[in-house]
């Protein structure tokens, strides 16, 4: 087990965009407020301090005078990925995939004779995208992700208005692994960040029972990915069969006739292999200002009962950045071979193939992305004088990710080939149907007042995945998840509070062979997004979160 202390070109592009919704599932509300973690994020009717800016800005009216809030959140990720071959595994008759086969490279058999029990693609360390450097930085094995936050609020004496702002991270996550890791075909390095650096807010106390509030979030959004590429597909298997069975007799004895008949495909120095590495791609996209807003209502008729509801708006973005592609030799040799023959040139022209694939390609990339809207409502109720229960129900519009469209500043060699397989692909763009769902989720939390100074808390939040079963993948290996939280709050004096918390999120997933079109589905029409086609996949994700919050009134 490794602690982190955390596939094709087009797949890499897809993964870059897909990482946002998938990471949203993993990181949503895990790095905003420590008290909320311990209450299962069921705090709409009882928001914690200045973090009410995010959870329900109407509750800012509970803060009197000048207050400051400083928090530190540390997250440790343990992510395990396991790949194995099912009974009868093969790609067009080939099963010597080095990912799950122990056979030596010079073994003449095209069928594996010694399968590994499993191949481990565990994440090895945490990674973060650094805006100034514009690249992903590995934190090293054993180093956790740290998310500090801070806020300030002010309620003038006798005023019904409260003003506040805070800097916090609605979503921060990143993972990485060393070269050669089996999991690298769905992201060797991945980072996603949404950081709200300014959130001017205002709340108004209508009367003793009712408050309303609103906040505007000014956020930075970044998505970055580095991934290896491969295409274990029947079409590539056909090309390997042609090279080994048809071209072999003519190797070194080719002539004009064979070139014409075989389209020049035998004039290559390296053949295509469905299990071979096709190269590597790096993409980073960002937007410096991504505005959104929150609107909330809080009804607090008594100390024993309260109701709150909040609407968090969508944020429409135009992410822009750069891409870099390192093309492997085999696909370059295939196009070179086709163009060495008159019939091959004609075939390539008919199919619209490029005349040449360069060793590297780079340029600018952009995509429209909508951070999904979210609505949540809940109650607080004292079932005993010293015991309060909170319950929330929320809905997030993940269906906004029905399709992603990536746009490039120039023609991409791989897209000129991939457009034969899909109407969603052109020479300079790629539209990917995702089919995400918009699930409802709930959370529950308990707070026990042990003394006038000490409060004990516990919470539970089951998280229903927005990813359909036939779209699951290993980019962030999480489907349905459970979040548990424990914590305490201690009041040193009437002006100073400290909260301590620990949260634990767990998720296990099993993706049987041929069940997901974005991970392991076989078939001629599943060329682009299946780096583990035909393999069984299992994942086990554990996230441990520690938090400390210091609040004081001046």
Image: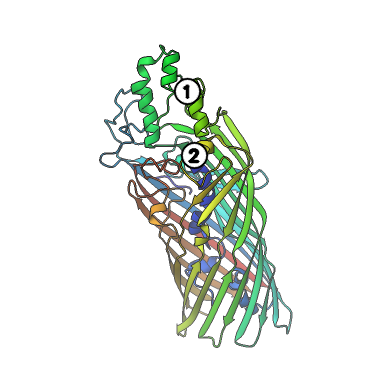
Q: Residue at x 48, y 37 (%)?
A: 229
Residues tagged 1 and 2 counted as in contact (Cβ below 8 A): no
Name the element at disc 1: helix
Q: Residues within 10 Å of mark 2 (few under 14, many from 20)?
A: many
| Residue 198 figure quarter | bottom right
- Where residue 288 sits in the image (x, y, percent)? 68, 54
Would residue 305 be found to the left or right of residue 480 on screen? Answer: right
- With 390 as the anchor, is 247 left or right in this view? left
Please state which of residues 511 and 406 is positioned toward the viewer in this rendering. 406
Task: Tell me the mark number nearer the camera, choosing from 1 and 2.
Answer: 1
Compared to residue 523, the image places residue 455 above or below, namely below
Q: How far from the left and from the top, in percent, is residue 8?
A: 47, 38
Q: Nearer the viewer, residue 345 or 529?
A: 345
Work out whether mark 1 precedes mark 2 in sequence or the reverse, and give the earlier one: 1
Instruction: Provide the residue designation for mark 2.
Output: 418
Residue at the image position 27 percent from the left and 32 percent from the top: 114
x%, y% of residue 446? 45, 75
Instruction: Tell me if residue 32 comes above or below residue 280 in the rendering.
Output: below
The mark found on residue 343 in the picture is 1
Q: Is residue 230 left or right of residue 212?
A: left
Residue 267 placement (x, y as % from top left)? 45, 19
Q: Nearer the viewer, residue 67 or 88?
A: 88
- One can see residue 70 in this view: yes
Q: Quadrant of residue 522?
A: top left
Residue occupying image coordinates x 35% and y 49%: 515
Q: Is residue 419 above or below residue 246?
A: below
* SS for callout 2: helix
Quarter occupied by the N terminus: top left
Residue 328 can be seen in this image: no
> Which numbered disc covers residue 168?
none
- Quadrant of image for the C terminus: bottom right
Nearer to me, 189 or 339 = 339
């Amino acid at each position: 087990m490794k602690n982190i202390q955390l596939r094709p070109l087009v797949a890499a592009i897809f993964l870059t965009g897909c990482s946002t919704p998938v990471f949203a599932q993993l990181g949503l509300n895990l790095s905003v407020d420590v008290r909320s973690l311990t209450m299962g994020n069921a705090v709409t009717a009882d928001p914690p301090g200045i973090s009410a800016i995010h959870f329900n800005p109407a509750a800012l009216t509970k803060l009197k005078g000048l207050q400051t809030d400083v928090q530190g959140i540390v997250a440790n990720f343990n992510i395990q990925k396991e790949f194995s071959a099912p009974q009868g595994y093969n790609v067009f008759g080939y099963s010597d995939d080095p990912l799950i086969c122990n056979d030596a490279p010079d073994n003449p058999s095209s069928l594996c004779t010694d399968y590994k029990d499993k191949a481990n693609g565990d994440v090895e360390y945490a990674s973060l995208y650094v805006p100034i450097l514009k690249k992903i930085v590995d934190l090293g094995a054993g180093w956790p992700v740290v998310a500090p936050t801070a806020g300030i609020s002010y309620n003038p004496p006798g005023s019904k208005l409260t003003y506040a702002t805070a800097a916090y991270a609605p979503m921060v996550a990143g993972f990485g692994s060393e070269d050669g890791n089996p999991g690298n075909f769905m992201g060797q390095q991945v980072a996603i960040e949404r950081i709200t650096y300014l959130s001017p807010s205002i709340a108004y106390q209508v009367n003793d029972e009712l408050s309303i509030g609103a906040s505007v979030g000014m956020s930075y959004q970044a998505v970055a990915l580095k991934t290896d590429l491969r295409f274990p597909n029947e079409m590539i298997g056909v090309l390997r069969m042609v090279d080994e069975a048809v071209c072999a007799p003519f190797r070194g004895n080719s002539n004009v006739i064979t070139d014409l008949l075989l389209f020049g495909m035998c004039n290559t120095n390296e053949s295509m292999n469905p299990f071979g590495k096709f190269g590597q791609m790096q993409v980073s996209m960002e937007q410096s200002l991504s505005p959104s807003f929150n609107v909330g209502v809080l009804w607090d008729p008594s100390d024993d009962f309260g109701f709150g509801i909040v609407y968090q708006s969508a944020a429409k973005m135009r992410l822009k950045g750069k891409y870099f592609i390192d093309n492997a030799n085999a696909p370059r040799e295939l196009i070179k071979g086709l163009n060495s023959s008159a019939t091959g040139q004609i075939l390539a022209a008919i199919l619209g193939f490029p005349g040449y694939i360069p060793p590297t390609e780079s340029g600018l990339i952009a995509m429209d992305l909508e951070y999904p809207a979210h609505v949540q409502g809940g109650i607080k109720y004292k079932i005993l004088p010293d015991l309060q229960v909170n319950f929330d129900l929320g809905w997030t519009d993940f269906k906004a990710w029905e399709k992603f469209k990536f746009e490039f500043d120039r023609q991409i060699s791989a897209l000129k080939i991939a457009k034969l397989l899909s109407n969603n692909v052109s020479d300079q763009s790629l539209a990917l149907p995702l089919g995400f769902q918009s699930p409802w989720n709930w959370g529950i939390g308990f707070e026990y007042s042990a003394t006038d100074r000490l409060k004990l808390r516990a919470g539970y939040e089951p998280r229903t995945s927005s990813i359909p079963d036939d779209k699951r993948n290993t980019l962030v290996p999480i489907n349905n998840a459970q979040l548990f939280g424990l914590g305490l709050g201690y009041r040193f004096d009437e002006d100073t509070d400290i909260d301590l918390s620990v949260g634990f999120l767990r998720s296990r997933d099993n993706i049987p062979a041929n069940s997901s079109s974005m991970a392991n589905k076989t078939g001629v029409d599943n060329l682009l997004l299946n780096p583990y086609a035909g393999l069984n996949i299992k994942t086990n994700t554990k996230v441990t979160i520690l938090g400390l919050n210091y609040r004081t009134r001046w």
